[in-house]
Image (tube, grey):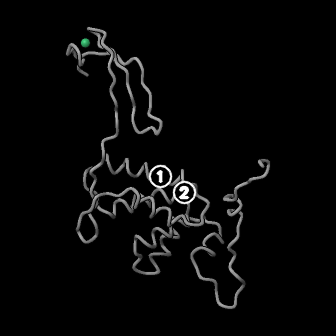
Amino acid sequence: MRCPKCGFRDDKVIDSRQSRDSSSIRRRRVCLQCAYRFTTYEQIERSDLRVIKRDRTHEPFDRRKLVNSLAKACEKRSISLVTLETAVDEIVHELETSGREVPSATIGTKVLEKLRVIDEVAYLRYASVHRRFEQVDQFVDAIQALGRRIKPNSLQPELFEPEMGGSPPVTAGANDTETKVETHGRV
Ligand SMILES: [Zn+2]
């Protein structure tokens, strides 16, 4: 960084700290020739990533949209917002480092890779919406591809309508307790 006072090209960083929201880093520098002190800011370059859609049209990449599509797949599953945001951060980072234009199918594949690890039900929901399974067989294949890690009943209440005349669907599970906020002890 060229010294703003004498133009010397070498300096030393004497202090470095993140902004409160961690979106930038502020560095105090001292010129190695004239000892003048100055400050620089480092920020993430705003992405101009574009998405190529199925119909070949382009649109600017929208992080919000990506978060929403993941959140929708994860509805009523006990997955924290932090987990989703982290997954989105990772996906965005991968996209930004791989080029300026990205096919929507590539984004879909990356989302599936993340969801597969996070939650099987969310994975299947997202896959069924965004992969547009051509046939039931494909959907069954996708379920089987997940292996036998899925607990026998975990898909039942989420993905399939209860049979007529059968027992009522089980909607309340252990997961529900995790979303409750404990308020006792503070009046
Ligand atoms: Zn200087």
Q: Find the distance from the CA under tag 2 to the CA under tag 1.
A: 9 Å
Q: Residue 24's quadrant in the figure?
A: top left
Which residue shows up at 32% across the image and 20% down it?
38
Q: Is mark 1 within 8 Å of ligand 1?
A: no
Which residue shows up at 23% across the image and 20% down it?
2
Question: How far across and down, in percent of the image, does residue 53 sit?
Answer: 28, 66
The number of discs equals 2
Question: How far across and down, in percent of the image, does residue 139 sit?
Answer: 47, 75
Question: How far across and down, in percent of the image, does residue 168 sit?
Answer: 71, 82
Which residue shows up at 64% across the image and 87% down it?
163
The answer to whether residue 22 is left or right of residue 31 is right
Q: Quadrant of the N terminus?
A: top left
Q: In the current view of this chain or complex, which residue is farthest to the bottom?
A: 165
Q: Which is more N-terminal, label 1 or label 2?
A: 1
The crowding category of the residue bearing disc 2, from other C-alpha atoms within 10 Å (few below 14, some 14 to 19, many at least 20), is: some
Q: In the current view of this chain or complex, which residue is farthest to the left?
A: 7
Question: How far across and down, in percent of the image, does residue 124 sit?
Answer: 50, 69
SS assignment at label 2: helix
Amino acid bearing label 2 = Ile
Q: Which image quarter has ligand 1?
A: top left
Camera-nearest label, 2 or 1: 1
Q: Residue 151's quadrant in the figure?
A: bottom right
SS assignment at label 1: helix
- Residue occupied by mark 1: 87
Which residue shows up at 48% across the image and 73% down it?
141
Amino acid bearing label 1 = Ala
- Residue occupied by mark 2: 118
Evaluate if marks 2 and 1 touch, with contact meaning CB atoms under 8 Å apart: yes
Q: In the picture shown, does residue 160 fall above or below 35?
A: below
